[in-house]
């Protein structure tokens, strides 16, 4: 049986994504009717990137049972890697044009010094830190988009999984890793402009095109990345590797007893999902225009877990639904579009109360709808877990029974 036949939901998802991309393109200001503004195209493009990192989170948490509270750190690292090239090249254009107006043509050393002064002047420096060694190479920075998050995840995962840290202790460790990275990036001597972060990322070097076109290009790239990432994730969980992932989630000790290297599987999943998160971040922040250490704060990774939980973990489409739903609703509430609610003695301003609503939603979903929004599709398709009522779980009469398996 072919992959498409075994995964009809993938074809449905790709069809919906393609139709959505086409509709936005037709209604965009760049080449369409103009019904969808450029700012909203950017919001939709960023939402698709958040959906991609949610798919990565679902792989590591929903399918493998590792509640990582650090995957937004990998998301941010991907943004920093591509942001360095964007900021360097854009500043190079400005500095070279300014120096060219002088009576003597500038040397490369003078241009480099001008670039360094322009980028790092806000932190009282003009020298390029070692971390910017490849900032002038798009190819190398694109490689670092996946290599930097992947290497950090590989080192952290190897140290954590070989020690067999699990459960809430592992979640705390991932959160500590995220906090440590954010605090380091806040320092001016980190080489990444400290609290100022990287800005002006929405300007593509060497491209003389209006923002309406640039935003649409990034929207297309985000849609393509989400489609490819979704297919890859579906392929991963649809085979033997995915069966082992679910086995680790449901009963890690039994999988280890069967002879599988649980730590190796966890490390592969953790590293792969970090790379996917890095790609999502590299597409997100050029659309946002700026990245700073606050984006990597632990609270962002907690939001990511909330999105997956609301959408329905253990379902790839649930992760996408959760990320898209919460992202768009958040933009509506925090953007001042939701009307205030006067209660006489108090006026509810959704800008202030949105996070409370989000937190309550997470609690309610956890208590009363653990399958999330994605679980609604089970009702429509009548997809229910098997009711064996104590029947044998294997072909032999003496095989494990459902009652025993739940103990």
Image (cartoon, rainbow, N blue to C red):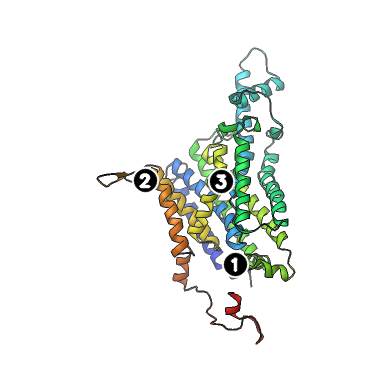
Disc assigned to residue 4: 1
Name which of mark 1 and mark 3 comes first in the sequence.
Answer: 1
Q: Secondary structure at mark 1?
A: helix
Q: CA distance from mark 1 to mark 3?
A: 37 Å
Q: Position of residue 228 (x, y in %)?
A: 60, 55
Q: In the image, is residue 247 above or below residue 119?
A: below
Of pointers 1 and 2, the one earlier in the residue sequence: 1
* Quadrant of the frame with the N terminus: bottom right
Residue in the picture at 50% in, 35% down:
210
Q: Nearer the viewer, residue 92 or 76?
A: 76
Which residue is found at the position 69% from the left and 40% from the top?
139
Q: Which mark is residue 382?
A: none
Pick the front one: 323 or 225:
323
* Mark 3 and mark 2: Cα distance apart in space: 23 Å
> Which residue: 47% across, 41% down?
30
Q: Nearer the viewer, mark 3 or mark 2?
A: 3
Residue 298 image label = 3
Badge 1, how many Cα within 10 Å: few under 14, some, many 20+? few
Mark 2 lies on residue:
350
Q: Which mark is nearer the camera, 1 or 3?
A: 3
Q: Secondary structure at mark 3?
A: helix
The CA distance from mark 1 to mark 2 is 43 Å
Q: Earlier in the sequence, mark 3 or mark 2?
A: 3
Q: Please tell me which residue is depicted at 64% across the width and 39% down the height of the picture.
A: 81
Q: For this rendering, which residue is in front, 198 or 256?
A: 256
Left or right of residue 383, residue 149 in this image: right
């Amino acid at each position: 049986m072919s992959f498409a036949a075994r995964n009809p939901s993938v074809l449905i998802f790709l069809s919906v994504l393609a139709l959505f991309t086409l509709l936005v393109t037709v209604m965009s200001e760049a080449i369409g009717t103009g019904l969808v503004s450029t700012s909203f195209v950017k919001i939709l493009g960023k939402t698709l990137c958040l959906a991609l990192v949610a798919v990565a989170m679902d792989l590591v948490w929903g399918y493998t049972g590792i509640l990582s509270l650090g995957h937004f750190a990998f998301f941010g690292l991907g943004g920093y890697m591509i942001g360095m090239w964007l900021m360097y090249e854009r500043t190079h254009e400005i500095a070279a044009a300014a120096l060219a107006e002088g009576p003597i043509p500038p040397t490369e050393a003078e241009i480099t010094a001008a670039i360094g002064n322009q980028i790092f002047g806000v932190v009282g420096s003009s020298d390029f830190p070692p971390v910017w060694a490849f900032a002038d190479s798009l190819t190398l920075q694109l490689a670092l988009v996946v290599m930097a998050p992947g290497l950090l995840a590989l080192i952290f995962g190897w140290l954590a999984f070989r020690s067999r840290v699990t459960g809430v202790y592992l979640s705390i460790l991932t959160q500590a890793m995220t906090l440590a990275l954010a605090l380091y990036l806040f320092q001016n001597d980190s080489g990444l402009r400290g609290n100022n972060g990287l800005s002006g990322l929405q300007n593509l070097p060497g491209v003389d095109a209006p923002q309406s076109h640039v935003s649409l290009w990034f929207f297309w790239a985000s849609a393509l990345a989400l489609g490819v990432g979704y297919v890859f994730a579906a392929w991963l969980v649809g085979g033997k590797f995915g069966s082992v992932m679910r086995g680790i989630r449901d009963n890690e000790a039994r999988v280890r007893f069967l002879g599988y290297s649980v730590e190796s599987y966890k490390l592969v999943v953790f590293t792969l999902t970090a790379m996917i998160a890095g790609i999502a971040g590299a597409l997100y922040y050029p659309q946002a225009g700026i990245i700073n250490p606050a984006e990597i704060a632990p609270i962002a990774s907690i939001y990511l877990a909330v999105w997956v939980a609301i959408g329905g973990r253990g379902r790839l489409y649930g992760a996408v639904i959760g990320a898209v739903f919460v992202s768009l609703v958040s933009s509506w509430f925090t953007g001042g579009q939701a009307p205030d609610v006067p209660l006489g003695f108090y006026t509810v301003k959704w800008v202030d109360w949105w996070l409370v609503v989000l937190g309550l939603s997470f609690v309610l979903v956890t208590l009363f709808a653990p399958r999330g929004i994605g679980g609604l599709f089970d009702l429509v398709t009548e997809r229910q877990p098997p009711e064996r009522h104590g029947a044998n779980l294997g072909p032999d009469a003496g095989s494990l029974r459902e009652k025993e398996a739940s103990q």
